[in-house]
Amino acid sequence: MNKDQQNAEEYVKIIIEDDLNRIMWEETKTHKDSFIERDYEIDDGAVIKYEWRGFPGNDPAESFNHRFSLIKLPVKNPHGLETGVIKIINFPL
């Protein structure tokens, strides 16, 4: 894992651990029995989209269990992060 990805994965840890000292706000965009989508703003201004699926999708791009994406860069971006998927957790085999 490269250092930039390691820095971006810090956001995943903040969300998984529900670190309320770092999460400024959270908004549920979609909540269904088999799909949840939430946005989180972190204290540095970054916005992360979290998606959960209760079943694999038919399209390989939609065949994840959990997906975390950076959708807004932090206000200060010393690590040169870019928007996009940070981490995917697939269904267990």
Image (spheres, rainbow, N blue to C red):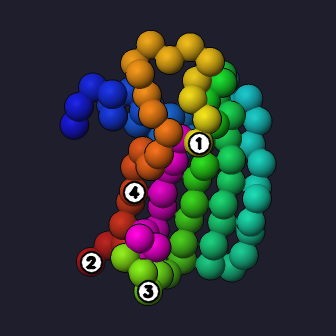
Q: Are marks 1 and 3 in contact (CB under 8 Å)?
A: no
Residue under the image location 58 percent in, 24 percent down = 74
Mark toward the viewer: 3 or 4: 3
Is residue 66 on the magenta stretch?
yes
**47 shown above or below 63:** above
The C terminus - image quarter: bottom left
Q: Quadrant of residue 10?
A: top left
Kind of residue at disc 4: Ile
Q: Tell me the tag on residue 93.
A: 2
Q: Residue at x 46, y 73 (%)?
A: 62
Q: Residues within 10 Å of mark 4 (few under 14, many from 20)?
A: some
| Residue linked to disc 4 | 88
Residue corresponding to mark 3: 58
- Give the Cα distance between marks 3 and 4: 16 Å
- Quadrant containing the N terminus is top left
How many numbered callouts?
4
Whether 7 is drawn above or below 15: the answer is above
